[in-house]
């Protein structure tokens, strides 16, 4: 969680220095979600998410160096410098991307689950989306099909309350998003997304159900982003007092206190973690700075992978 936080803080700083261009959506405040999902799954379980993707990508195992280089648009980035902030990707880490079209990854996540079922694995697709995407038609079509086919998918709504800048209460008659599962007889639950322990327990239950062939689950993770929707967000839709109230629930500070008070971890051990993370982030920046830009001949590569695809006519 600390690595995700420090990486994002550095990314925000570099964005202000114009080292990083384009859109940039930070994960600060939501780190408990990534941590709890990782400890409750296996490395081969595919993850897919929207464009607030840095935290999940790093948690899934993509190196901070490859992620920072991607933010810089460098050839050594996890998407070869072609994706930028919103489109991290790691095939060997089973991280199937950040996606820029709101809600589109919901259907693709179910497709990943279908592929795992088709191949006969017991892998589970974790499909993340924000509260704003819960109003997309794709969600309802996908929920119906996922339940019909009992796909091994966990739909995880990272509900940070404001979508792009409009509260859930102003956009939906159903403010408890997990209740959307009821229409499809899908299990659904509301989870404290500020607690890595609560996230782990909820995801572990859903994973067990999916691996057993019992189909999907909808988990609404109640979380909070301390920064704006993107770096260009003036955040006029919420008060500073509200942000400060949520900062008192900061998962990193709460976890640190738990480690110190309940598990006998020393301040010196915490300090070593802090220093190790600091060095890892600094090294990622140096790596990005020193990496080359993509060659011009990369422009049309990776657009389509199958050279003998029969339905393309020259």
Image (spheres, helix red, strand yellow):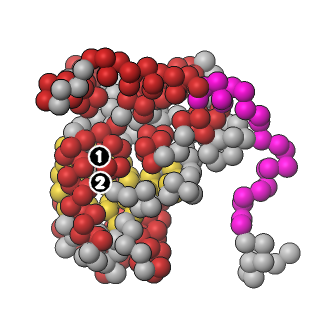
Tell me which residue sits at (57%, 57%) in the image.
91
Tell me which residue sits at (73%, 32%) in the image.
291
Tell me which residue sits at (18%, 26%) in the image.
264
The answer to whether marks 2 and 1 mark residues whose Cβ atoms lie closer than 8 Å is: yes
- The quarter of the image holding the C terminus is bottom right
Compared with residue 47, is residue 289 higher up or lower down, i.e. above or below? Answer: above
At which x and y percent is residue 219? 25, 56
Drawn side of residue 226 relative to residue 12, left or right? left
Which of the pair 148/118 is nearer the observer?
Answer: 118
Q: Which residue is mark 2?
A: 40
Drawn side of residue 254 relative to residue 48, left or right? left
Stretch in magenta: 284-305
Which of the pair 124/105 is nearer the observer?
Answer: 124
Q: Residues within 10 Å of mark 2 (few under 14, many from 20)?
A: some
Task: Tell me if residue 175 can be seen.
Answer: no
SS label for mark 1: helix
Distance between mark 2 and mark 1 Cα atoms: 6 Å
| Residue 81, picture quadrant | top right
At which x and y percent is residue 234? 42, 24
Tell me which residue sits at (13%, 29%) in the image.
262
SS label for mark 2: loop
Compared with residue 240, is residue 132 higher up or lower down, i.e. above or below? Answer: below
At which x and y percent is residue 200? 24, 49
Drawn side of residue 288 relative to residue 102, left or right? right
- The quarter of the image holding the N terminus is top left
Q: Which residue is mark 1?
A: 36
């Amino acid at each position: 969680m600390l690595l995700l936080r420090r990486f994002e803080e550095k990314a925000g700083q570099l964005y202000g220095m114009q080292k990083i261009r384009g859109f940039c959506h930070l994960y600060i405040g939501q780190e408990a979600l990534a941590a709890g999902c990782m400890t409750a799954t296996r490395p081969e379980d595919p993850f897919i998410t929207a464009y607030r993707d840095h935290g999940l990508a790093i948690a899934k195992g993509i190196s901070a160096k490859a992620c920072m280089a991607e933010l810089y648009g460098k050839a050594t980035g996890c998407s070869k410098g072609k994706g930028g902030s919103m489109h991290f990707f790691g095939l060997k880490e089973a991280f199937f991307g950040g996606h820029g079209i709101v809600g589109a990854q919901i259907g693709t996540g179910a497709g990943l689950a279908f592929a795992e079922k088709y191949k006969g694995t017991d892998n589970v697709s974790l499909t993340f989306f924000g509260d704003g995407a819960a109003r997309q038609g794709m969600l309802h079509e996908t929920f119906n099909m996922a339940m019909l086919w009992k796909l091994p998918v966990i739909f995880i709504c990272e509900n940070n309350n404001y979508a792009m800048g409009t509260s859930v209460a102003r956009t939906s008659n159903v403010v408890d998003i997990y209740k959307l599962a009821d229409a499809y007889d899908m299990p659904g639950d509301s989870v404290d997304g500020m607690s890595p322990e609560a996230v782990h327990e909820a995801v572990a239950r859903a994973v067990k159900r999916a691996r057993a062939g019992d189909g999907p689950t909808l988990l609404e993770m109640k979380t909070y982003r301390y920064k704006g929707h993107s770096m260009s967000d003036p955040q006029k839709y919420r008060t500073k007092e509200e942000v400060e109230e949520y900062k008192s629930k900061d998962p990193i500070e709460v976890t640190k206190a738990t480690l110190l008070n309940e598990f006998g971890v020393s301040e010196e051990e915490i300090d070593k973690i802090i220093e190790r993370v600091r060095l890892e982030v600094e090294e990622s920046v140096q790596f990005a700075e020193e990496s080359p830009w993509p060659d011009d001949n990369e422009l049309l590569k990776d657009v389509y992978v199958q050279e003998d695809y029969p339905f393309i006519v020259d």
